[in-house]
Image (tube, rainbow, N blue to C red):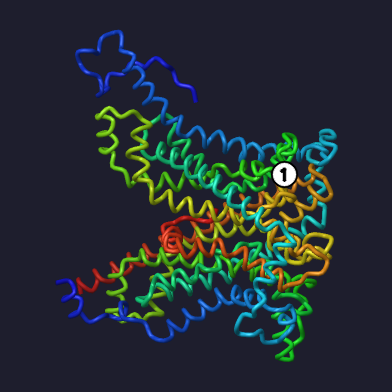
Amino acid sequence: MTTTLTPPEEKSSEAVPPQRAKPKLPFKYRLSRWDVKASPYVYIAPFFILFGLVGLFPLGYTFVVSLNKWNLLTGPGGFVGLSNYVAELNDPFFWNSLFNTVSIFLLSAVPQLIIAVVIAAVLDQNIRGKTFWRMSVLIPYVVTPVAVTLIFSSAFDEKYGAINNLLQFFHLNPIMWKTETFPSHIAIATMVNWRWTGYNALILLAAMQAVPRDIYESAALDGAGAIRRFFSMTLPSIRPTMIFVIITATVGGLQIFTEPKLFNPTTATPGGPQRQYQTTVLYLWDLAFNRQNFGKASAVAWLLFLIIVLFGLLNFLISRRIASTEARSSKRKTAKRLAAYNQNKIS
Amino acid sequence: MTTLTLKKRKPLGIDRRPGFLTYGLLIVFFIGGTYPLYWSFIAGSSPSSVLTETWPPLLPGGLFWQNVGQVIDTVPFWMSLLNSVIVSTVITISVVLFSTLAGYSFAKLKFRGREGLLVFVIATLAVPTQLGIIPLFMVMKQFGWTGTLGAVIIPTLVTAFGVFFMRQYLVDVIPEELIEAARVDGANMISTFWHVGIPAARPAMAILGLFTFMTAWTDYLWPLLVVPQNPTLQVALSQLQSAKYVDYSIVLAGAVLATIPLLILFILAGRQLVSGIMAGAVKG
């Protein structure tokens, strides 16, 4: 980020008073040239330096740690190549954590997206008190994940929880929310959904509002009902935003930590007595700070990093694929219609 | 005149006022969003025996302050509240300042390598920096910073998202002529930034600040790691649950108590939060 003090020879400089543009430039002018040249870099420098130091360097150094035997207390214990990775890829606990992460992620992402679309569609009408209703769906967002977990962890309590109380009232069997795998995933996904659905609904609402109203009007004139308009006009036009929501939900969802960490604090192993809901970040945490194996934990961090990148790319490719097939098919349809129209005109 | 034409035109079914179904659904969403919080308040203001009843009472009991008193006795509530305020404020100032500077530079100044560096910023948007906690922790321990608020603050002093967000906002909002006019008037670069850039950036700075503050406030993993003994509010709150015997009415009183600061923020700035999200501010 260093720049030369001497101004390079450039002819197009507006600030130069013509009489004084002689060989030796006045100090003030040189200072101003330097100011113009260096300022842009000076302004971006804090971000790049700090981001490099606290964002990228740790991530990169995690890879170095992952290639070593490394203990939390005793430090590095020799280069071991990729053997930490091999060990983790053969560790059933790692695969268990990955299964839990993906399961919780799917249980939260799919219902969340559907409900968010419904909420957004309801908010997208000409309702009274718009601001009030929009704000009301955002209330769960101001409850912090820790508080959300405490609240739902109480509601999902196996003996005295509000939900099992209710189930028993209806003569149903109580569900073992904290000891069975699938119910625990549902419970944790519920917490994520509760906090984020309204937030995502507002993002989707913004996309819906960007659809020009006169398109709807002409469709309505042509006799398309509200449902029809929603499926064949609203949904396709908010697709890019939906993809955006899915990608951010993926990056966040694969790193879920707070909810499973605090769901049942009485167990010795974080993530359930038999690791029923131990997510990968929680597994990483346990490996690094309880079992003190920094080498293996770093390998897990990098594996998860690669998985997140892979999911991101997959999302991107699928969405591009959908977009391009759609463009092709709509082009074909238009061509057909045009041909039919021309034929009608001719005959 | 416009009102006249509007009145004359018969709505075609899209600008019509919606019916009961819509408002019914809105009320359902409202209850779904607020009931868990309200229920926590009921439970947090009642003896814990309320939790075993099938139908929780509809109105809060009178024990809220007593339960809050227990919360304050169990965890260092006031200290952790102060810690959270300090941490979130410093992070917010830092992120907003550096993002505005860098965003302004990317949006309005010409320099070699601008495009490449901007692509780099965008590429790092999705990088899960949280996965770098192991070396970060080692560094904090090495320097003896664990247990200090600095250790909580340092890793989030800047975000790629902030830079990108400010750049996107400023690129459209400041006309080139304004910057040139300031330059012709003899303003140097930094005073141009100060007198042209900052005033134009103010609305976006407010939104970025709001979201940065909330993200910093809600963070749990990293503070839990570096300051368990000198906790932030979230860490202290989680410690309520760590006792062998969990008294949920106290835990829930704590959850409600810890929600109050953000609830106040929401009442004051909820509109800006909504418009910020709708303007494309994304999760931190």
Q: Residue furthest top?
A: A23
Q: Residues within 10 Å of mark 1 (few under 14, many from 20)?
A: some
Image mark count: 1
Question: Where residue A34 appears, x then y in whole percent?
Answer: 38, 21
Q: Residue at x 40, y 70 (%)?
A: A131
Is B240 above or below relative to A80? below
The chain holding disc 1 is: B
Is residue A333 rendered to the left or right of residue A76? left
Is B143 above or below relative to A205? above
Q: What residue type is disc 1 on?
A: Gly
Residue A240 visible: no
Tell me the element at label 1: loop
Question: Where residue B181 appears, x then y in whole percent?
Answer: 25, 34
Is residue B163 rendered to the left or right of residue B63? left
Q: Residue at x 40, y 67 (%)?
A: A208
Camera-nearest residue between A318 and B122? B122
Question: Where residue B224 appears, x then y in whole percent?
Answer: 71, 52
Question: Where residue B244 appears, x then y in whole percent?
Answer: 83, 66
Q: Residue at x 46, y 84 (%)?
A: B24
State the image quarter where residue A248 is shown: bottom right
State the image quarter where residue A185 is shown: bottom right
Q: Residue at x 53, y 52 (%)?
A: B213
Q: Residue furthest left?
A: B1
Quadrant (top left, top right, bottom left, bottom right) of the C terminus of chain A: bottom left
Residue B213 visible: yes
Residue that badge 1 annotates: B147
Is residue A97 rendered to the left or right of residue B33? right
